[in-house]
Image (tube, grey):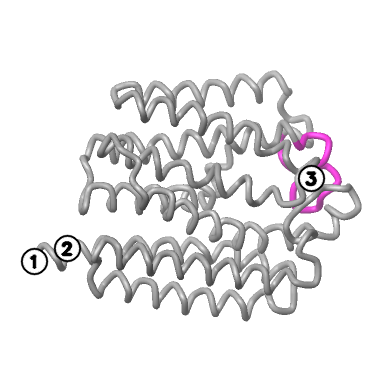
Amino acid sequence: MRLDKPIGILLLLWPTLWGLWLAADGPPDMFILTVFVLGTVLMRSAGCVINDYADRNIDPHVVRTKNRPLATKAVSTKEALLLSAGLSLCAFLLILPLNRLTLELAVFALFLAASYPFTKRFFAMPQAYLGIAFSFGIPMAFAAQTGELPLIVWLLMAANLLWVIAYDTEYAMVDRDDDLKIGIKTSAITFGHFDVMGIMLCHAGFLSIMIGIGLMQKLGLAYYVGLIAASGLIIYQYRLIRKRDPVLCFRAFLHNNWVGAVVFAGIVLGYLTEAT
């Protein structure tokens, strides 16, 4: 479940929180917020388990993943599948009190989470598929809070998709040599020599759409200060990845937690300053 490595939970949680605050035009309903936070932890955990199940014959050949429980046969495939199913069921039970649209979106989100690990076999850029899966908390947040899916939902999903491609390509750069030997497909391999440029263009697209969302929602100065801070963090990431050192690329990937955090802080402070 990798609860000892919460970066995945945080990267999944930040855009969901963006969506909840934007949907509510400020602090969301506390029950809905609690459901989504707990659901994020459960679904990320389930996703990790099914990912390890899908990669159980690949992980032993990758330095970074060779000691994972399924790779070392510390647990059985049956145990892994039961755990993933149990976590998914708990997440689904959490959202049962919410409206029908949220439940319908949850079914599709579950399909995306379960199918993503297998896309590395045939899809040249599985990071894009992951970006869709990691963005589905956004329409679910709007559905739960408002019962509707306005235009801003799709803009926020597009922004997050670009952000996910950027940071998960940094992650893929860490394993590129092993992935090439095994035959796994990743955006780091697909971009080739343009990997750093591709990452920075995705970051630029992400920030541009977020500026547009701020203008549409008439968010205050604090929001744009948050985006400026995020821009500074992204420039720092460029300094980390430009020489393609695996250790520094992994550090850049982890650093995206702060990008998500400052964007969220900007949204929250923007609404707080408007309220006062």
Left or right: residue 145 compared with residue 157: left
Residue 11 rendering spot, x and y as whole percentages: 49, 53
Residue 177 rendering spot, x and y as whole percentages: 85, 60
Instruction: Report the Cα–Cα distance between label 2 and label 1.
Output: 6 Å
In the depicted structure, whether residue 271 falls above or below residue 31? below
Residue occupying image coordinates x 27% and y 51%: 21
Asked whether 259 or 247 is in front, the reply is 259
Q: Residues within 10 Å of mark 3 (few under 14, many from 20)?
A: some
The residue beneath circle 3 is 66
Which SS class for mark 1?
loop
Q: Residue 98 in magenta?
A: no
Left or right: residue 243 compared with residue 153: right
Magenta part of the protein: which range?
A: 55-69
In the depicted structure, whether residue 255 falls above or below residue 157? below
In the depicted structure, whether residue 16 falls above or below residue 81? below
What amino acid does circle 3 point to?
Lys
Left or right: residue 154 compared with residue 167: left
In terms of image quadrants, where is residue 214?
bottom left
Image quadrant in which the C terminus is located: bottom left
Residue occupying image coordinates x 24% and y 35%: 31
The residue beneath circle 1 is 276
User: Which numbered mark, 1 or 3, is in the foreground of this view?
Assistant: 1
Q: Residues within 10 Å of mark 1 (few under 14, many from 20)?
A: few
Which SS class for mark 3?
loop
The residue beneath circle 2 is 272
Asked whether 114 or 124 is in front, the reply is 124
The chief SS type of the magenta part is loop
Q: Residue 58 in magenta?
A: yes
Instruction: Report the Cα–Cα distance between label 1 and label 3.
Output: 53 Å
Residue 96 rendering spot, x and y as whole percentages: 34, 21
Which residue, as the protein is rendered here, is positioned at the far right?
181
